[in-house]
Amino acid sequence: MMQYAHSYTICSNRGAQASILFKSFLTRSLITNSPADPQLLYADKCSMFVLLRFVSPSRTGIQTFRKESERFWTVIAHPTLNVYAAGHDGGIMVFKMERERPAYAIHDNILYYVKDKFVRRLQLGTSKDFPIMQIKKNGSSYRSSPHSLTYNPAENAILVASNTTNPETCVVELFPVPKNIDTSNPESVEARKTAGSTGIWVARNRFAVLDKTRQILIKNLKNEVTKKLEISTCEAIFHAGTGHLLIKEGDNVTLYDIQQKKSLNSVRCTKAKYVVWSADASKVAILGKHMIAICTKKLNSICSVHENIRIKSGGWDDSGVFIYNTNNHVKYVLPNGDSGIIRTLDLPVYITLVKGSTVHCLDREVKPRMLSIDPTEFKFKLALVNRKYDEVLYMVRNAKLVGQAIISYLQQKGYPEVALHFVKDERTRFSLAEECGNLDIALEAAKTLDDKPIWEKLGKLALQQGNHQVVEMAYQRTKNFDRLSFLYLITGNSEKLKKMMKIGRKGTLFF
């Protein structure tokens, strides 16, 4: 700054009710603190770069944090994450300035998502990513990050919902997608706005809006109200196909018929936030803060999974397995409720589509990414659940399935004979062979181990199956002469019985 001979006033912030103690340029925001008014922390959404070029003197406050009897003294930004810490008399408060989850929708392997002031279209699996329209003009007042985006392929229209903490400022906007798209200079599209926190398509030319009074409005493409639904306990609405809605009511999610105005079914899911439908709309995954409920299209419960870490997003695999992620892991859940870890994550992502061994997702900077996964484990387990033993046999012979976890899973689910193909340790092989009654493998392992307790177990197993030859061998190796003599007696083997009597008179038995 010292090399310049002149200084210029670029903009000014006014509105503090008393003197300002602390103000600092941060990575993403300008934070202003007024300690003489101890209840307020002012935050203006403008990066340093935009601030230097901004010509309008107006500023809009986007968030207010209150402390009833304490003063804020300092604010600092995380060097890489969208996280800030504010120090006050009683401690430190950590907060975010803006929502990090991007608004997106998927249709026929095409991803529509909002980045900056544009709606972009990405052909998944390719590099064809371009803006299709502009939804926020340059120089306009601050607009919060969109909360959700839904696409209507029949009318080629998009609903964008901006859900803020203040119900008065929540808005749902209807945008028609331009027919002629100029990717180098996308046109700005005028929206039809309606007050509400969420917008969901319920038919080809109808959409539902949840307004600030918790009333559900059914509107046409002209933004005219055609029907009103009075549901006092409604907290949020989700997509459920033509003529239906999923309604969050406390810890329950209800399937609601719009035409008949009645509830069809209900399932419990604590703090439900999102729903993800399978490609054929036969199943739905309801994502809560720490819970996933897998249901049929009629909302009959299939299974549920609980997590200790917050669930971020998910998508359906082509085989019917639900893939989801937390902050640190990509996981799977089978229709029978079994779950497991697929891979770890360096940073949180938001899954958009799962295709084979590739997970398409968006990161917090709204950049499309592709993650490679190994689906062998959950496809192997799915084949076992569906009793497709030809696929199981093929994967046993060709796939690299190793590890104690697979062996334990097969034992727990009652498939020890399959687990035998993965085990090389003879003691473990004997235990599995004993469990599934495979006498041949148990005998091979017993000969290798040559341990008295093993031979005793083998003798019991062979006796249960009526194989007296193996029983005889086991009694001989353990020198259990009483049982051996009785075995010869009941099998009518008088020759060996006489031999034992002769040797017994001499005081020694030898075989």
Image (spheres, rainbow, N blue to C red):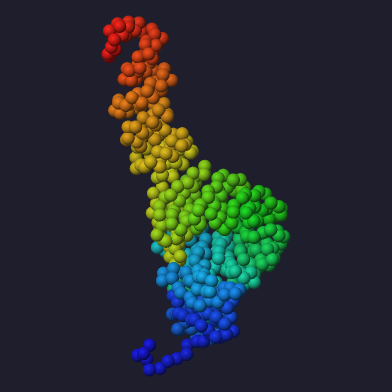
Answer above or below: position of 189 versus 314.
below
Q: Position of residue 254 (x, y in %)?
A: 65, 52
Residue at 51 percent of width and 78 percent of height:
73
Residue 35 figure quarter:
bottom right
Residue at 45%, 73% (x, y): give it. Answer: 77
Q: Quadrant of residue 151?
A: bottom right
- Residue 272 in picture, x, y percent from top left: 58, 56
Pinpoint residue 382: horizontal percent, then vertical percent: 46, 41
In the image, farthest residue toward the front:
507
Q: Nearer the viewer, residue 66 or 10?
A: 66
Q: Is residue 24 above or below residue 101?
A: below
Measuring 41% from the left and 57% from the top, which residue is drawn there? 345
Which quadrant would the N terminus be assigned to in this image? bottom left
Residue 83 location, x and y as percent?
A: 47, 69
Residue 133 in sight from this viewpoint:
no
| Residue at 69 percent of width and 51 percent of height | 263
